[in-house]
Amino acid sequence: MEVASGRGPRALGVDLGTVRVGLAISDPTGLVATPLDTLEVAEQGKRRPGQGQAPADPDAWARELAVRLAGIAREHDCGAVVIGLPLALSGRDTTSTTLARRVAEALRAEGLTVELWDERLSSAEAERVLLDAGRRRAARRAARDRMAATIILQGWLDARPR
């Protein structure tokens, strides 16, 4: 089953953050999402423990991240990249929503098929799953972004018509 014309059957899920970006990947059948990796993306000298901040040059940051994500998507033969869209609970755009849209635009410029997927509460759900699994605080922090990307991607996979 092809996700996007002329490309592989897998999809790459992305949970964006200004410090870390969580990644997940679907199986070749496009049914199951699994955690893949976490990228460190904080700008040099800008990282504050436990707190992300907007990049100094959001367009340059989005382009640089898009190049990294495009390489990963191609390496894993992904036909689509699904980026979590961090809307406010009210449904309104946020600063993070704008960054997600910029990354999506930059990925499309790299020639990839990109979907934006509502990710409201995915990080909270990821935290709950990791707590239920008995993960300690440090282990939860390391896995939370990958798990959030997995939740985003699985939601997108489940919503697609079969």
Image (cartoon, rainbow, N blue to C red):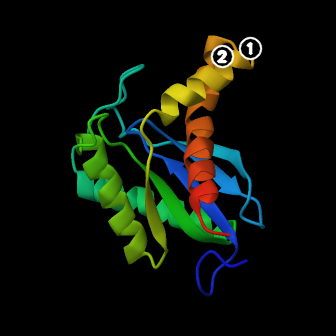
Taking the view exactly as shown, the residue that stands out farthest to the bottom is 6
Residue drawn at x 68%, y 72% is 77
Whether residue 55 can be seen here: no
Quarter of image, res 101: bottom left
Q: Which amino acid type is marked by label 2?
A: Leu
Report the label total: 2
154 with respect to 101 (left or right):
right
Q: What residue did someone put label 1 on?
A: 134
Q: Position of residue 54 (x, y in %)?
A: 26, 38
Q: What residue did someone put label 2 on?
A: 131
Q: Position of residue 120 (x, y in %)?
A: 42, 38
Question: What is the quadrant of the N terminus in the image?
Answer: bottom right
Mark 1 crowdedness (10 Å alpha carbons): few <14, some 14-19, many ≥20: few
Q: Secondary structure at mark 1?
A: loop
Q: Which mark is residue 66?
A: none
- The answer to whether residue 157 is above or below residue 50 is below
Taking the view exactly as shown, the residue that stands out farthest to the front is 161
83 with respect to 44 (left or right):
right
Q: Secondary structure at mark 2?
A: helix
Whether residue 111 can be seen here: yes
Callouts 2 and 1 close, C-beta under 8 Å: yes
Residue drawn at x 36%, y 67% is 106
Q: Which amino acid type is marked by label 1?
A: Gly
Q: Position of residue 96 (x, y in %)?
A: 30, 42
9 with respect to 72 (left or right):
right
